[in-house]
Image (spheres, rainbow, N blue to C red):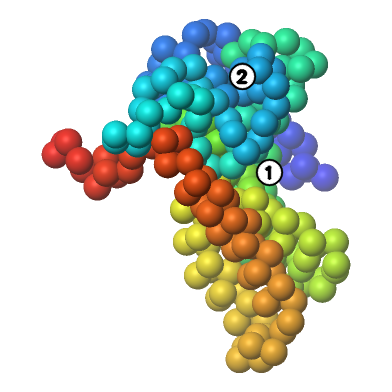
Amino acid sequence: MKSKIILFLIIVLGLGLRLYKIDIPLADHHSWRQADTAAVARNFIKSGFDFFKPQIDNFIPLHPGVPNKERLFLVEPPIYNSLVAGVYSILGVDIKWARMVSIIFSLGSAILLYLISKKYFGAKVGLLSAFFFSVLPYNIFYSRVVLPEPMIIFLTLGMFYFCLKWLQSQSIVHYSLFMALSAISFTQKSFPFFFFLPLLCLIFQKYKFSFLKQKKLYLWFLVSVLPFLLWRWWIGRFPEGIPGNLWLFNQNNI
């Protein structure tokens, strides 16, 4: 009970730190990328909801030599943008609500980090993990950005946590949550795929080499990876809406 009270106070502290100037314009670091993410959510309200053809606010060609007349912005599936648009439809279009969605995911990540750390190292380490996650300045800034990353961290930690719970309980509820969170997180960015290794370690620890006979693991893998492949196939039909990626390989020789 004491640990839960302390965790609650940590979450309240984390919330308070993240609410500082929550309504300032998108003019901070990485505002260029945040502006595009915010534009997609805003245009879902302004122009109508089209999950498969998210739009930004400019006609700049995202792919060299291919005009982008529809203003498409095809990166990860716009799940975060859709959630923000849903909040906009209720509370009105205001950037603070977009930040609030990210904050909620971030605080949820702190709770999941506590639960995972508690399982392996005890409640004290779990509370310290949640505390430092909540108060580190760098993390405070990047956990309230108008970007999908705070949501992705929550999804990835949730995937890991419910894998633990499923392996322990064999509950269909835990298995379903593990599978659903895996499917969503793998569609968003590449870094959740790095969790395949620790997940494989957990699975091997449970089943040893008999994991090759577990039909549920094959179903999990199929359901987890198929949405990613389908999304990549879909956006491949609209190259004008896919941003270039050479900058990831130091295109400008920074």
Q: Position of residue 152 (x, y in %)?
A: 57, 44
Residue 104 falls in image quadrant: top right
Classify 214 as above or below 171: below
- Name the residue carrying label 2: 43
* Residue in the foreground of this view, choosing between 214 and 141: 214
* Residue in the foreground of this view, choosing between 43 and 148: 43
Q: Amino acid at mark 1?
A: Ile
Q: Helix, strand, or loop for circle 2?
A: helix
Residue 122 falls in image quadrant: bottom right
Sort mark 2 into few (<14), some (14-19) or many (20+) by Cα contacts within 10 Å.
some
* Residue in the foreground of this view, choosing between 174 and 90: 90
Image quarter (top left, top right, bottom left or bottom right) of the N terminus = top right
Residue drawn 62% across the image and 23% down it: 41
Mark earlier in primary sequence (2, 1): 2
Image quarter (top left, top right, bottom left or bottom right) of the C terminus = top left
Q: Amino acid at mark 2?
A: Asn
Residue drawn 59% across the image and 63% down it: 225
Proximity of marks 2 and 1: CB atoms separated by less than 8 Å:
no
Question: Distance between the Cα atoms at labels 2 and 1?
Answer: 32 Å
- Mark seen at residue 189: none
Classify 62 as above or below 197: above
- Name the residue carrying label 1: 111
Residue drawn 38% across the image and 28% down it: 67
